[in-house]
Amino acid sequence: QVQLVESGGGSVQAGGSLRLSCAASGYTYGTGCMGWFRQSPGKEREGVAAITTGGGTTYYADSVKGRFTISQDNAKNTLYLQMNSLKPEDTAMYYCAAAGYAVWRYYLLRGQSYNYWGQGTQVTVSS
């Protein structure tokens, strides 16, 4: 059974930074992908960043390119999202997701591509 547990959310002022972590248990690295998604009230879920767990190739939504960095530490079974230059519009619940199979790169930021999800961690950015 795969379990994903996010941590690291909180409140920060605009321009600040946060690092989210996602501890994965029961997940086999190397053949699938993991990603970060976010959702705020009244808005659709948005794919933020994704990484292939085998090759470490990363993908980002245009809205976060240059500000967010996704990374993984396979030895610690942990996925990270470093968020810099945060903006009020980054305020959302952030979710970690994992898929145990290869996903076509054009689908990596689509939630339907993932079959495991964490409970989420709240990020609030004030102006």
Image (tube, helix red, strand yellow):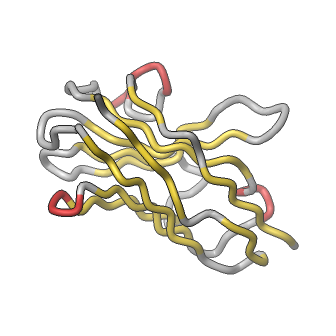
Single out the residue that lies furthest toward the front: 1
Give the residue displayed 29% in from the left and 28% down from the top. Answer: 1
**Is residue 44 or residue 18 the one in the foreground?**
18
**Is residue 99 or residue 61 the one in the foreground?**
99
Residue 73 sits in which quadrant? Answer: bottom left
List x then y, in percent, for residue 115: 38, 23
Q: How many marks?
A: 0
The C terminus appears in which quarter of the rendering?
bottom right
Single out the residue that lies furthest toward the top: 112
List x then y, in percent, for residue 61: 52, 46
Q: Is residue 12 above or below residue 118?
A: below
Give the residue displayed 45% in from the left and 34% down from the top. Answer: 109
**Is residue 73 or residue 60 the one in the foreground?**
73
Q: Is residue 38 above or below residue 77?
A: above
Q: Is residue 52 left or right of residue 14?
A: left
**Is residue 51 or residue 122 the one in the foreground?**
122
Give the residue displayed 49% in from the left and 26% down from the top. Answer: 111
Q: Is residue 78 left or right of residue 43?
A: left
Residue 8 sits in which quadrant? Answer: bottom right
